[in-house]
Image (cartoon, rainbow, N blue to C red):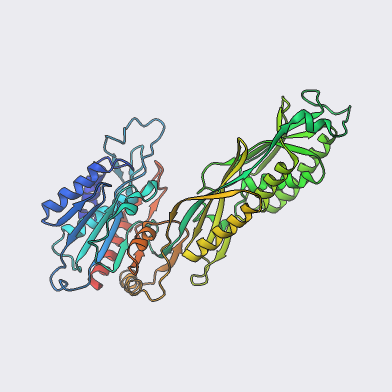
């Protein structure tokens, strides 16, 4: 079956044209030009900026000419991923769409329905001479998937609308009315190294203990693996165990029973992902080797009981290494590293007081490692309020300051805060009820949307976000529900008619 046979044909025909144009993040020039040519062909005022953002203006339909305008917004770029045996070059070749009439997917690659279907919806509205709608300001942004770069660069001086509909959500029936802002915080704590032989020789030795180099020390690698991990925004409420903090907890417990020094430590990979793995190498006095292993085992037993429901595949390993260490962190540095990673805040910090069951403020300790003369660990702090983000960052900064460290912030972006008196939300809820026969779920998302960036640029604009059902986005298994697209198209037209 061909995608052009699907209904609504006016939407799927544009989606197919979009799929024919390479438009991965950082490669949006061709899709931006396509949208500009579309506007020209339909006699619509439009502009493209140097970041490949495109803005298209359309007057209101008959009877709606004098209504307040509305912004329809989606992003032009997509995540380009493909199966290992796929030979398509997504930077220059088209996406090969497939359908069985119920779902749409791509052959061997991501589909790009995130957010190509939004662009298709918007173009179909702009091209129509039968849809009732107020004046439209279509905002098509670039590079959302790599940091919302287009939205950050967007010139909003010509945008007069005070209402904005973002079509970049993946669950039909859910209206999003708030999103988290965020800031990345890199924490650096100074550490001091000393000769391993020096610290070992200062204590009692056990002649019967086995050590790798015969110099009174035994090195152990302590490894955490198999944790569930997850997205540090939308899955932070699941309370999945952070591998870095689990590792620090094991070492903290062992420090009360055995004398050891840290040799190396690393964990996690990205600030926006809950760490699934972590590893430390420690140097233990040979007289404490057995005690150290026993202490780790004791702590492991406690943790496995604590996390058995959420971390069924968790694995903690303690192994002797083949070589001894030449340099180790001194006593105070070892203590400070363990203290910093075990006791610093992490996870859900505050729940929303306005939307039941929603996380309002959180932080994720996403990565940690020893580098040269410092411990580096990085947070992504999120909050659906500006105040919440500021207060939590102050707490992290104060904590690090007491360890003689410093905090550097980057990638700060604003929240889209909940608007208690939103008229747009009321219209969208009523329109949903008219189309579906029941009310939608109204909620917030504890992750970043372009709405947050745009809210910062256009204070006071009333916003909402929704979209059709998409599955497995950002993977070659991505697919789009055809019936959901049809219903969402009807819903969008009902909203526009009601504005």
Residue drawn at x 39%, y 72% is: 439
| 394 sits left or right of 223 in the view | left
Residue drawn at x 49%, y 70% is: 355
| 397 sits left or right of 418 in the view | right
Residue drawn at x 56%, y 65% is: 350
* Quarter of the image where one finds residue 236: bottom right
* Quarter of the image where one finds residue 108: top left
* Quarter of the image where one finds residue 69: bottom left
* Quadrant placement of the C terminus: bottom left
Residue at the limit of the structure toward the top, as seen here: 213
- Of 334 and 223, nearer the camera is 334
Question: Please, is residue 79 above or below residue 151 in the view?
Answer: above
Q: Is residue 102 visible?
A: no
Percent across and percent down for residue 351 are 55, 66
Q: Is residue 432 visible?
A: yes
Residue at the limit of the structure toward the front, as seen here: 404
């Amino acid at each position: 079956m061909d995608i052009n046979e699907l209904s609504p044909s006016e939407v799927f025909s544009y989606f197919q044209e979009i799929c024919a144009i390479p438009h991965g993040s950082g490669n949006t020039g061709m899709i931006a030009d396509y949208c500009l040519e579309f506007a020209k062909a339909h006699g619509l005022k439009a502009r493209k900026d140097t970041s490949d953002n495109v803005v298209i203006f359309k007057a209101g339909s008959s009877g709606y000419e004098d209504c307040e305008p509305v912004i329809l917004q989606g992003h032009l770029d997509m995540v380009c991923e493909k199966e290992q045996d796929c030979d398509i070059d997504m930077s220059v070749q088209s996406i090969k769409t497939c359908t069985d009439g119920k779902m749409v997917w791509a052959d061997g690659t991501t589909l790009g329905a995130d957010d190509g279907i939004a662009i298709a919806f918007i173009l179909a509205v702009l091209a129509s001479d039968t849809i009732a709608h107020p004046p439209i300001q279509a905002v098509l942004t670039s590079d959302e998937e790599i940091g919302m770069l287009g939205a950050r660069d967007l010139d909003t001086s010509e945008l007069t609308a005070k209402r904005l509909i973002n079509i970049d959500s993946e669950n039909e029936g859910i209206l999003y009315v708030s999103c988290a802002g965020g800031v990345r915080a890199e924490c650096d704590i100074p550490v001091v190294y000393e000769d391993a032989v020096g610290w070992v020789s200062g204590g009692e030795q056990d002649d019967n203990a086995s050590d790798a180099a015969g110099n009174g020390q035994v090195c152990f690698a302590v490894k955490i693996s198999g944790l569930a991990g997850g997205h540090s925004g939308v899955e932070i409420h699941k309370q999945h165990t952070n591998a870095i903090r689990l590792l620090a907890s094991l070492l903290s417990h062992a420090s009360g029973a055995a004398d050891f020094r840290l040799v190396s430590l690393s964990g996690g990979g990205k600030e926006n992902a809950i760490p699934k793995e972590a590893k430390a190498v420690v140097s233990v006095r040979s007289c404490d080797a057995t005690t150290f292993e026993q202490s780790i085992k004791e702590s492991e037993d406690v943790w496995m009981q604590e996390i058995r429901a959420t971390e069924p595949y968790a694995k903690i390993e303690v192994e002797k290494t083949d070589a001894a260490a030449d340099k180790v962190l001194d006593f105070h540095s070892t203590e400070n590293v363990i203290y910093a990673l075990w006791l610093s805040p992490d996870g859900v910090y505050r729940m929303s007081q306005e939307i039941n069951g929603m996380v309002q403020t959180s932080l994720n300790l996403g990565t940690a490692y020893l580098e040269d003369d410092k411990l580096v660990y990085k947070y992504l702090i999120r909050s659906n309020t500006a105040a919440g983000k500021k207060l939590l960052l102050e707490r992290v900064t104060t904590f690090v300051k007491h360890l003689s460290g410093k905090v550097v912030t980057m990638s700060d972006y604003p929240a889209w805060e909940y608007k208690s008196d939103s008229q747009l939300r009321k219209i969208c809820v009523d329109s949903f009820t008219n189309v579906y026969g029941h009310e939608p779920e109204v909620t917030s998302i504890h992750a970043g949307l372009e709405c947050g960036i745009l809210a910062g640029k256009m204070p006071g604009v009333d916003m909402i976000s929704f979209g059709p059902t998409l599955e497995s986005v950002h993977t070659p298994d991505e697919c789009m529900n055809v019936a959901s697209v049809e219903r969402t198209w009807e819903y969008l037209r009902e909203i526009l008619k009601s504005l």
